[in-house]
Image (spheres, helix red, strand yellow):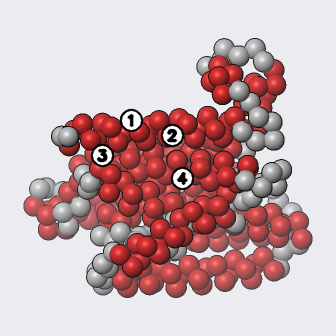
């Protein structure tokens, strides 16, 4: 079997899994729907009021949130792994997710103290500032060009930021504390279509930018010297791509809360399937990130009957064993 045929088969299988999970999320739950009717509803051909209502009003927003979150985390993780030359890099491990979460928690804490209602755009700005601050601190360590030091610094930074978040939570009233606690466990806290539409467009814009920079990403996989050798402006490309990775992570945090390890797991599995070439690695990582989140959404809403679990808890249960496997199998210098 030639490499081209293997790649085509891999994409076909992943797309089939993606579609199957999409239909499963929309079909199963408290109200079980016929898969054929669900497909008709998606194409606007169903006249069944119940099916249309359940699909579009109850389940589609959660599905869309899963796709946005999984795709952005996977793309962010892929970029961070290429930039740091570290297969264990992920926005949740390097402290970016914790920084974005802290930014949102601070904004919610201050708004509750002064009696203001924050719009989604302000929360996005707060998440962005938090993510940029934490990544800036991490980049100070990154100057030493040591993958293991960057990884350990990210773990330490995450612990410190989570400690600050906990202190702020303890000062909140019961209502805000419960809301923040659920959100930090990984929950789609805002499933309004206007909010999700904005986040979808934001994510599409970032992914288009990454696609335009695929040649630079391919060069960076060769290392700094190799990238210079083929004409890549390493400093500029690195800064732009780091900014895109932070934006993807903060956008995912804003939609799905503090969800961990999707950005670690998806790119590593993608490499085993399609190799190191970013042209194939990027779409494969995106598909896998979406599949992981849709699978978690399906399990969270169906595994325990009428009790829905936070999606972030299911993701952690699925991805943590793989992280431990990578930790012991990958060589980190």
Q: Secondary structure at mark 3?
A: helix
Nearer to us: label 3 or label 2:
2
Q: Residue furthest right?
A: 174
Earlier-in-chain disc, 3 versus 2: 2
Earlier-in-chain disc, 2 versus 1: 1
Q: Is residue 190 above or below residue 88?
A: above
> Residue at 44% across / 57% down in the picture?
266
Q: Is residue 250 above or below residue 150?
A: above
Can see residue 222? Answer: yes
Please tell me how crowded label 4 is: few (under 14), some (14-19), or many (20+) other residues with Cα within 10 Å: many
- Is residue 263 or residue 7 the one in the foreground? 7
- Residue 201 placement, left or right of 61: left
| Residue on which disc 2 sits | 18
- Is residue 301 or residue 151 the one in the foreground? 301
Q: Residue furthest left?
A: 229
Please tell me how crowded label 1 is: few (under 14), some (14-19), or many (20+) other residues with Cα within 10 Å: few
- The part of the image, by quadrant, that contains residue 14 is top left
| Residue on which disc 4 sits | 292
C-alpha span from label 2 to label 1: 10 Å
> Residue 12 got which mark?
1
Residue 232 point in image, percent of width and height: 18, 57
Q: Secondary structure at mark 2?
A: helix
Residue 68 point in image, percent of width and height: 56, 46
C-alpha span from label 3 to label 2: 17 Å
Q: Are marks 4 and 1 in contact (CB under 8 Å)?
A: no
Nearer to us: label 3 or label 1:
1
> Residue at 52% across / 47% down in the picture?
290
| Residue on which disc 3 sits | 280
Residue 60 point in image, percent of width and height: 68, 36
């Amino acid at each position: 079997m030639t490499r081209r045929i293997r790649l085509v088969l891999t994409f076909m299988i992943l797309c089939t899994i993606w579609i199957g999970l999409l239909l499963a999320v929309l079909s199963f739950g408290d109200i079980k729907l016929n898969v054929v009717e669900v497909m008709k509803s998606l194409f606007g051909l169903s006249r069944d009021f119940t099916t249309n209502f359940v699909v579009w009003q109850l389940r589609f927003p959660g599905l869309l949130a899963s796709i946005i979150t999984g795709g952005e985390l996977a793309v962010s993780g892929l970029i961070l792994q290429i930039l740091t030359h570290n297969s264990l890099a992920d926005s949740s491990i390097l402290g970016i997710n914790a920084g974005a979460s802290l930014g949102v928690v601070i904004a919610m804490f201050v708004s509750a103290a002064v009696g203001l209602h924050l719009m989604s755009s302000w929360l996005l700005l707060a998440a962005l500032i938090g993510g940029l601050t934490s990544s800036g601190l991490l980049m100070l360590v990154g100057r030493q060009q040591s993958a293991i030091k960057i990884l350990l610094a990210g773990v330490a930074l995450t612990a410190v930021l989570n400690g600050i978040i906990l202190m702020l939570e303890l000062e909140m009233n019961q209502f805000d504390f419960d809301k923040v606690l659920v959100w930090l466990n990984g929950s789609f806290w805002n499933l309004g279509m206007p909010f999700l539409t904005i986040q979808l467009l934001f994510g599409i814009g970032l992914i288009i930018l990454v696609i335009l920079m695929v040649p630079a990403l391919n060069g960076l996989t060769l290392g700094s010297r190799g990238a210079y050798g083929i004409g890549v402006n390493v400093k500029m490309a690195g800064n732009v791509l780091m900014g895109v990775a932070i934006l993807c992570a903060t956008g995912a945090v804003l939609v799905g809360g503090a969800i961990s390890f999707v950005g670690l797991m998806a790119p590593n599995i993608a490499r085993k399937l399609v190799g190191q070439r970013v042209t194939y690695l990027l779409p494969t990582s995106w598909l896998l990130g979406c599949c992981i989140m849709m699978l978690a959404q399906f399990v969270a809403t169906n595994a325990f009957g009428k009790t829905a679990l936070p999606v972030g808890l299911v993701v952690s249960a699925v991805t943590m064993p793989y992280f431990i496997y990578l930790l012991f199998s990958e060589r980190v210098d």
